[in-house]
Amino acid sequence: MADTDQLTDAVVTRLADDLDAGFVDLVRAYEKVVYSVALRVGGPGDAEDLAAEAFLRAYRALLGYDRDRILALRPRPWLLTIVLNTWRNSVREAGRRPSQVPLGEAGDLPGGGPSVEEAAERAETRRDLAVLVAALPTTQRVAVVLRHVVGLPIGEVAAVLGCPDGTAKSHVSRGLRRLRMLYLGRSGGVGDDVGSALVPRRMP
């Protein structure tokens, strides 16, 4: 996982010593996860702009931080909080809800080479799930995406959502339960496909 203690320490130390050079390291270390979340909440048409705006806001914020505050940063949840806040602001300003990207676009199918039929069936399941995930309440949707698509530990999901760990777990659980009910109601099948399709992507 990208946000190991060693990576965190290296990035924040570099930022504290040389903000401009350290920011390059920050972008390189976290640009994939930032873009991944931007893609899922903002849609493919807005993801690049959303990610770029989030990094710009992060840099502006760092300009006002002293060394101790920079050294205390947890870069990944901090950046993803900025992504989500930037997205929420853009939605409020635009007065619309962005379209969603299919959950399966960011990662390969798991397993040792599925057949064409299996791959097509799974892709169809993921497209269906993407529509259903978009119908979840915003907090549940973000919690499910962060936990089961991006693969964040529950502590970082809580940090991004700005709530206790137990509350974050509740949002994830309720989101999955509602997603399963929506999926069952739409497909008339069993609920196992929900869990198998929501495969966390490996962090960069």
Image (cartoon, helix red, strand yellow):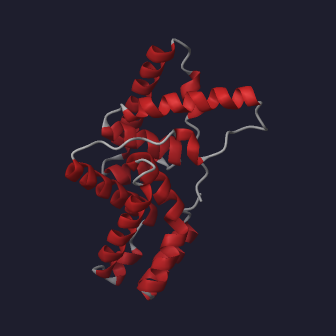
Q: How many discs mark residues in the rendered view?
A: 0
In this view of the protein, which residue sits in the foreground, 81 or 68? 81
Q: Residue furthest front?
A: 45
- Whether residue 20 is visible to the viewer of this picture, yes or no, is yes
Left or right of 187 in this view: 92 = left
Rendered position, 193 above or below 1: above
The image quadrant of residue 69 is bottom left
Q: Residue furthest bottom?
A: 18
The image quadrant of residue 76 is bottom left
Left or right of 45 in this view: 120 = right
Where's residue 27, x and y in %? 49, 71
- Whether residue 195 is visible to the viewer of this picture, yes or no, is no
Where's residue 122, x and y in %? 63, 29
* Residue plotted at (59% across, 57% down): 1
* Residue plotted at (42% across, 51% down): 45
In which quadrant of the rendered image does the C terminus lie? bottom right
Where's residue 189, x and y in %? 55, 13
* Residue plotted at (42% across, 53% down): 38
